[in-house]
Image (tube, rainbow, N blue to C red):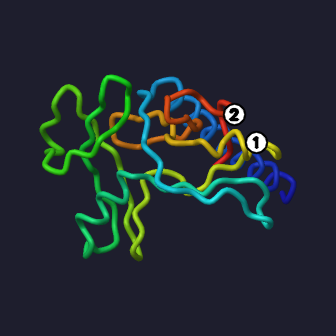
Amino acid sequence: MKTLAILLCGLAILLGVNAQVWRFEHAIDSGEPVLLRLAPVDPRSLMQGDYMRLNYEIARQWAQAHPLQPAGSSQLVIRLDNQGVAHWQPHGEVGKLAPDERLLNLVHREGSVKVGPNAYFFEEGQGEVLAGAAYGEFRLQPDGSSLLLGLRDAQLRPLGATRGRW
């Protein structure tokens, strides 16, 4: 009986992990490419290895416009320019999107606003290459969720490996 229970638990874990992998792969394949301008970053941590702290200009703009917002989640309206760069539309209506507008989910708590991961891990020795990062490359879903794929420079060229770890 114990063996069966262990086997079923292992199978449940395996199914859960595979479902998560499938969800990420589906987001990569079906998501719309969107670039978010990065705010200043810190390049390295001795305890965690090579990584870059990420912050996003859109998150800073929203936080400045909503300084007393209680903790929770929101959706903001972004407009995509012809290069796929997202720009916050402060007067955009979530229920009435123009053809060049999309939704982007954000989470706000304890004075911070998050629209994507706050760290991008990379292979040792890639720090100099990634120091020129100006944009995060995302795949955006219609519901506003997003997945970070990589970093791009100021000329929108991909930097380093196509997929980091976050």
For this orientation, the residue located farthest to the right is 3
Q: Residues within 10 Å of mark 2 (few under 14, many from 20)?
A: some
The quadrant holding residue 102 is top left
* SS class, disc 2: loop
Taking 15 as reference, is 135 left or right?
Answer: left
**CA distance for labels 2 and 1:** 7 Å
User: Residue, x 35% and y 42% (percent of image)?
Assistant: 144
Task: Name the kind of residue labelled 1 in the image.
Answer: Gln
Query: 12 left or right of 27?
Result: right
Check if mark 2's residue and mark 1's residue have beta carbons within 8 Å.
Answer: yes
Q: Residues within 10 Å of mark 1 (few under 14, many from 20)?
A: some
* Residue matched to label 2: 160
Q: Is residue 76 above or below residue 148?
A: below
- Quick one: SS at disc 1? loop
Which of the image's four quarters has the N terminus?
Answer: bottom right
The residue indicated by pointer 1 is: 126
